[in-house]
Image (tube, rainbow, N blue to C red):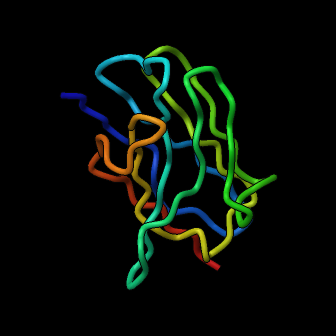
Amino acid sequence: QVQLVESGGGLVQAGGSLRLNCAASRSIFSGEVMGWYRQAPGKQRELVATILSGGRASYVDSVRGRFTIARDNALNTVLEMNSLKPEDTAVYYCNLRQVFSDSGYWGQGTQVTVSS
């Protein structure tokens, strides 16, 4: 069992920045991927960014160039969010899974609200 705890959410004006942190109870193993997802009210949960154990990152088109996912240390994965837009408002979750798995472990989420 792996515990994931997100932190760093809050209220920010459009154009501002936030740094989200996902603290894991163990490090990422080879063959695993850590991801950040978000779910806005009335919408499905969507993938925002992922990072493999080796450090390779990928992003959804809507955040590419504004968000950066990185391994802060062996246990912490951060999501740096810049140039925030009202449409980025959502609950943000981190997820740890095997690369070829659809499930894995989830955190409890952290609310990000961007005001216009």
Q: Nearer the viewer, residue 28 or 11?
A: 28
Q: Residue furthest left?
A: 1
Q: Residue furthest bottom?
A: 42
Residue 51 on image: x %, y % = 59, 35
Q: Quadrant of residue 22?
A: top left
Q: Count how many numbered circles sit on residues in the image.
A: 0
* Residue 10 relative to residue 68: left or right: left
**Residue occupying the point 29% across, 41% down:** 105
Q: Is residue 81 above or below residue 105?
A: below
What is the quadrant of the N terminus in the image?
A: top left
Residue 87 on image: x %, y % = 61, 76
Residue 89 on image: x %, y % = 52, 70
**Residue occupying the point 44% across, 21% down:** 28
Q: Nearer the viewer, residue 77 or 97?
A: 97
Q: Is residue 79 above or below residue 76?
A: below
* Residue 17 relative to residue 6: left or right: right
Residue 56 on image: x %, y % = 69, 30
What is the quadrant of the C terminus in the image?
A: bottom right
**Residue occupying the point 65% across, 24% down:** 55
* Residue 1 relative to residue 12: left or right: left
Q: Nearer the viewer, residue 65 or 54?
A: 54
Q: Residue furthest right?
A: 65
* Residue 95 relative to residue 37: left or right: left
Q: Quadrant of residue 72?
A: top right
**Residue occupying the point 39% across, 44% down:** 101
Q: Is residue 70 above or below residue 26?
A: below
